[in-house]
Image (cartoon, rainbow, N blue to C red):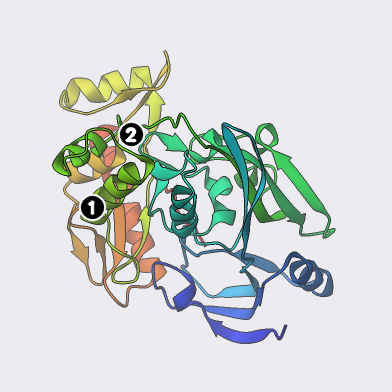
Amino acid sequence: MPIQTNFSLKKYNTFGIEAKAKQFIAVHTVEELKTVLKENTNEKKFILGGGSNMLLTQDIQALVIHVDLKGKRILKEDDDFVWVESMAGENWHEFVLWTIDQNFGGLENMSLIPGNVGTTPVQNIGAYGTEIKDTFVSCEAVNIATQDLKTFNKEECNFGYRESVFKQEAKDQFVITSVVFKLTKRNHKINTFYGDIMKELEKQNVVNPTLKDVSNAVIAIRQSKLPDPKELGNSGSFFKNPIISKADFEKAHALHPEMPHYVVSETEVKVPAGWLIERAGFKGKRFGDAGIHKNQALVLVNYGNATGQEILAVSKDIQAAILKEFGIAIEAEVNVI
């Protein structure tokens, strides 16, 4: 397992940002991961998964450990459910397609989300009415300091909207190595009521959708709105949809009565960040090689040679403009490094 120095991370982040790692190593088993951690106790470490949820704004002055653990297996099953374990380095979308091919239900609405399985619990990723927490059972993770393997159950992960214990109390302390999901084998809960899924199924003349039909609809919608990172550097949705107090929403809504919204609770309302960005006039705008995608205002893009700093500057301009115009603060969903 040779450690490489001054290593380019351009192919290891979906924004396609050119940044260098002081040191770099890929690990393919849990034992390799433990060994690298143990042998480099005093080195500053940076854990790299699929590189899909980060914006590199500088070189990384640390040992970058690329988690490339592969494999998936059925742990147990009964007549109704199956418990499936996937290693952290498996590509998320390919894993979702595999579950659908097995007729296992629960992940189909999250088709085509970029990244690897191991980072999905960190963000509690979600799309079209489903989130990881809906099917998550547990994950195993190596403690960076002690190299001990720990199992986190659902309660311990403390999932929230794009949140988990791995972004809070346990941040930078663990490397997730595998994730277990509980999926349906029959009586699937087909969820077609969020976003444009119903419209897309109607367009495809699908009346009684299967798991595959829902997945295909989600893929078609995402491809129509979101650029392929292999063709245009991006990290999917750059911002979270803001959840604001009812009082703050009513103030903004009084000035902008056409503002779409979703009631979260008696005291909170969610507003689509994409709508705010579009109304602020940023959709499709380009600033050098950094810009906002023409079809989806939530997506910031690298047209070729943008630096992370340039993309970050655009994101800050967007945040400032929205705060000024709507009185609403929006947060980055992407991790800025």
Residue at 22% x, 33% y is 207
The quarter of the picture where residue 203 lies is: top left
Q: Residue at x 41, y 44 (%)?
A: 108
Quarter of the figure that contains the N terminus:
bottom right
Q: Residue furthest front?
A: 79
Q: Which mark is residue 268?
A: none
**Nearer to the camera, 279 or 183:** 183
| Between marks 1 and 2 in the image, the one whose residue lies nearer the viewer | 1
Separation of residues labelled 1 and 2 (CA atoms): 24 Å
Q: Secondary structure at mark 2?
A: loop
State left or right for residue 264 relative to residue 30: left
**Amino acid type of the residue that numbered disc 1 sits on in the rendered structure:** Lys
Q: Position of residue 221 (x, y in %)?
A: 24, 48
Q: Is residue 233 above or below residue 203?
A: below
On the image, numbered disc 1 is attached to which residue?
A: 225
Is there any visible trace of residue 173 in the rendered image?
no
From this view, report whether residue 268 is shown above or below residue 317.
above
